[in-house]
Image (cartoon, rainbow, N blue to C red):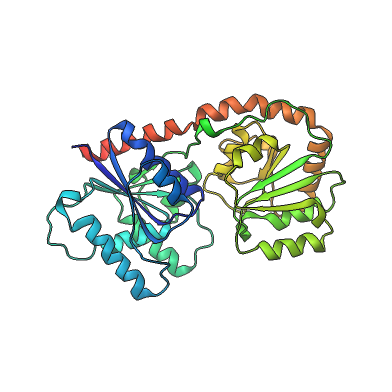
Amino acid sequence: MLPLITHILPTLSPYGAERVAVELAARLPAHGFRTRVLVLFENGPLQQELRARGVRWAMLAPSAVRSFSGRMATVRRLHTRLFGEPERVPDIVHTHLFGADFWSSVARLIPSSSAIRPAAYLSTAHSVDQDDGAVRRVARRWAARRMTRVVAISQDVARYVQQDLSVPAARITCIPNGIALDQVRSRGPRPFRDVPRLLMVGRLEAEKGHERVFQALAGVAAPWRLDIAGDGRLLRTLKEAAERLGIASRVHFLGRREDIPALLADADLFLFPSQWEGMGLALVEAMAAGVPVLASDLPALREFAPRHSLLPLDNPVRWQEAITTRLMESSAAVAEAHALAPTIRARYDIENMIKAYAALYHSLLRT
């Protein structure tokens, strides 16, 4: 029988880490594995994609769980799924994000009558998690050190896992996230529009840096239009900031969108002002589509983005100058982005990621 890989997610939110897990679960059967997905606490938009792609999955909590007792009940159900049925024990447990890492490690502490256990426990570290408090950092470190192997999605995340989470280097493997090339729509070499269309994609949270870019855009002469795809807790705050800075009529909040490839193909300039990133998959997708980009100068982004496109987030004046220059010298920006796109596509093709994980699974099963 083919090896079974069980992926564990806290929720089915439509963000980078969750999408990567869904892609793995959907594509690994073509590489000799069975897969299933266990969701701990909340459903989300990705449940429709799981169904459409024929991925086996199960929701362990009947609804959103907030209390400690409710979470422990979910953990007991997780223990039963992983260890209570000998014929269904996975060969490898693969967790994504803190909730899955921590609570699956807790589930392993519950006594089991079965002597059959998974061969390996694997976690993918998707970020550098700079917003962790002291207690959460201790819990994250405890869970990470219990893993057979930790996958880092960039060299910067690998450094974080080793230095901050105290995981030995020998137990860290670097596998960059990948993009589905069949979903990439090329922007092509067309010139900027008469009213250039700027685009930001990401959750409306403080770490994504939207307000700093608003400050920069307040000094950029019209015409331009900014589209923002994504939802989050800061929607009202960001709308108020745009009003205060006098740019509200040119800033359009699109909400959560399923047509990001189409938005990228229509964009003239992609802005990515994150305070921290594990890899920056949205930026990779924009570059693969051939969109000119400006992004924060972060270690993870230096691994693939041109250095002259990276700017200090805490300097709105630099962002204002760079955006103005891109708008004035758009032909050069378009030519450079169009020439770089094939390299990004080849490097971050999702099949490269799938093959790397398949090789890692086989290695873990052999040992």
Residue at image location 62% in from the left, 58% down from the top = 204
Residue placed furthest toward the right = 221
- Rendering coords of residue 57 (x, y %): 34, 50
Q: How many marks?
A: 0
346 and 172: which is toward the camera: 346
Q: Dividing the picture into quarters, in which one does residue 310 lie?
A: top right
Q: Is residue 27 left or right of residue 118?
A: right
Looking at the image, is 42 positioned above or below residue 46?
Answer: below
> Is any atom of residue 21 visible in this view?
no
- Rendering coords of residue 77 (x, y %): 27, 63
> Is any atom of residue 279 visible in this view?
yes
Residue at image location 51% in from the left, 30% down from the top = 182
Residue at image location 46% in from the left, 50% down from the top = 46
Q: Dividing the picture into quarters, in which one does residue 253 lie?
A: bottom right
- Rendering coords of residue 145 (x, y %): 33, 56
Looking at the image, is 47 positioned above or below residue 138?
Answer: above
175 and 229: which is toward the camera: 229
- Rendering coords of residue 303 (x, y %): 56, 37
Looking at the image, is 342 positioned above or below residue 294?
Answer: above
166 and 350: which is toward the camera: 350
Residue at image location 79% in from the left, 28% down from the top = 331
Q: Looking at the rendering, in which quadrant would you find the N terminus?
A: top left
Q: Is residue 22 left or right of residue 326?
A: left
Q: Is residue 282 left or right of residue 146?
A: right
